[in-house]
Image (cartoon, rainbow, N blue to C red):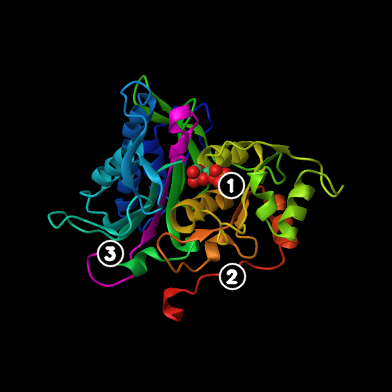
């Protein structure tokens, strides 16, 4: 494979094909899913860019599975992704943050061997104030018999992902993905409508500059979490102080830390004892990317990618970013978070 640099003019489609050649057994189905997601990202970027103009701001009166008031763009982004991938014959089913149940492939379309799990527009509450938002996706292989996807296909640990990625709709639109051969970033050139390679082989610094945490929950944290955050801030003399940068949009906070080094933390707290972020379509895909970039991700007691899922919309505490800072979390949070029992153990 050609070793590209950030100055190479390489489209995401070409890069996907080059990466596919690293897998002699590849059939091109996974590449097809990534093409379709890149198309969906361009369409969502268009909607996000024009959100302030077309009076589609503000919330619908629908409530999604999270009990959150759905922003109209959430619904639109969800539809765009489903319609972009449901007819390609590569998926057996999908799961979305916006839908309570598995999304089956329409009867008139062929089923494939992969499952797609996604958060169509994370951080959507930030849309009205022009803060970056993002799409997050995860791809796993079907493991059950039969053509159609089942819940068991969705409830796989993150280490079984074959691809994952995110799109950040910020000052520019970027797509970052991995298929297990490193993490690679592409920036949308709106003048030609192409994602161009801009960040080949992303590597996250081993120690971070930035700490991303909402410390308004400090009163709800356990003592060991409070102690960890003091350490990150340099208050106990064990670590050089980190600067706090918290956007309140997971993809924006994660992306800055991935490129510049840092740690994003959303600890369990007395109000959210399992944490807030979703395992299958937020923590797992970002954990795959950060490990491919030399970082790490834990729930405070266990590697995120080794957590056995029990529920489609399961939440998890999340500490993700620079490897040494994540290791500091693991060592200071000695008591693992009680896990939900996997389906089989019920
Ligand atoms: P809090 C946005 O609603 C989100 O799901 C993530 O994007 C973000 O990291 C987190 O919640 C922010 O949560 O409790 O700090 O407002």
Residue beneath the point at 47% across and 34% down: 126
Helix, strand or loop at mark 3: loop
Number of numbered discs: 3
Residue appearing at x 55%, y 61% in the figure: 274
Left or right: residue 198 compared with residue 51: right
- The x and y percentages for residue 115 are 33, 58
Residue 136 falls inside the magenta stretch:
yes
Left/right of residue 206 with respect to residue 259 in the rendered view: right
Q: Is residue 185 above or below residue 332?
A: above
Neighbours of disc 2 within 10 Å: few (<14), some (14-19), many (20+): few
Residue furthest right as drawn: 237
**In the image, is 299 to the left or to the right of 163?**
right
Q: Judge depth for marks 1 and 3 and give the one in front.
A: 3
Give the residue furthest to the left: 108
Q: Position of residue 63 (x, y in %)?
A: 34, 48
Task: Check residue 293 in the rendering and tell me which mark sits there, or answer none.
Answer: 1
Q: Evaluate whether residue 183 shows in this view.
A: no
Q: State if disc 2 and disc 3 touch (CB < 8 Å).
A: no
In the displayed structure, would residue 174 be above or below residue 236? Answer: above
Q: Earlier in the sequence, mark 3 or mark 2?
A: 3
User: Quick one: label 3, few (<14), some, or many (20+) residues within 10 Å?
Assistant: many
Kind of element beneath mark 2: loop
Q: Give the residue number, with chain letter if any, for mark 3.
A: 149
Task: Check disc 2 and report the residue beneath it.
Answer: 338
| Magenta stretch encompasses residue 179 | no
Closer to the chain start, of discs 1 and 3, is: 3
Q: Nearer the viewer, residue 116 or 202?
A: 116
**CA gap, disc 2 and disc 1:** 28 Å
Say which quarter of the image contains residue 190.
top left
The magenta segment: 123-148
């Amino acid at each position: 494979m050609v070793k590209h640099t950030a100055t190479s003019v390489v489209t995401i489609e070409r890069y996907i094909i080059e990466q596919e050649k690293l897998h002699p057994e590849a059939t091109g189905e996974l590449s097809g899913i990534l093409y379709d997601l890149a198309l969906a990202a361009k369409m969502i970027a268009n909607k996000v860019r024009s959100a302030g103009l077309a009076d589609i701001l503000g919330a619908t009166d629908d409530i999604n599975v999270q009990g959150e008031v759905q922003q109209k763009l959430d619904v639109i982004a969800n539809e765009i992704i489903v319609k972009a991938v449901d007819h390609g014959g590569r998926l057996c089913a999908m799961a979305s943050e916006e839908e309570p149940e598995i999304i089956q492939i329409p009867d008139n379309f062929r089923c494939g061997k992969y499952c797609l799990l996604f958060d169509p527009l994370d951080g959507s509450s930030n849309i009205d104030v022009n803060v970056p938002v993002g799409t997050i996706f995860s791809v796993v292989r079907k493991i059950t018999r039969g053509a159609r996807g089942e819940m068991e296909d969705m409830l796989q640990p993150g280490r079984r992902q074959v691809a994952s990625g995110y799109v950040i709709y910020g000052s520019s639109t970027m797509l970052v993905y991995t298929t297990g051969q490193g993490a690679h970033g592409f920036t949308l050139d709106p003048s030609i409508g192409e994602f161009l390679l801009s960040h080949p082989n992303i590597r996250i610094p081993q120690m971070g500059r930035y700490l991303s945490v909402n410390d308004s929950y400090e009163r709800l944290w356990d003592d060991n979490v409070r102690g960890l955050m003091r350490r990150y801030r340099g208050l106990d003399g064990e670590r050089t102080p980190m600067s706090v940068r918290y956007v309140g949009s997971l993809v924006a906070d994660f992306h800055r830390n991935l490129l510049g080094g840092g740690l994003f933390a959303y600890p369990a707290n007395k109000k959210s004892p399992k944490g807030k972020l979703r395992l299958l379509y937020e923590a797992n895909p970002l954990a795959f990317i950060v490990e491919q970039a030399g970082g790490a991700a834990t729930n405070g007691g266990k590697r995120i990618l080794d957590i056995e899922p029990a529920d489609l919309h399961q939440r998890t505490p999340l500490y993700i970013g620079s490897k040494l800072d994540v290791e500091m979390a693991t060592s200071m949070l000695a008591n693992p978070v009680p896990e939900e029992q996997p389906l089989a153990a019920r």
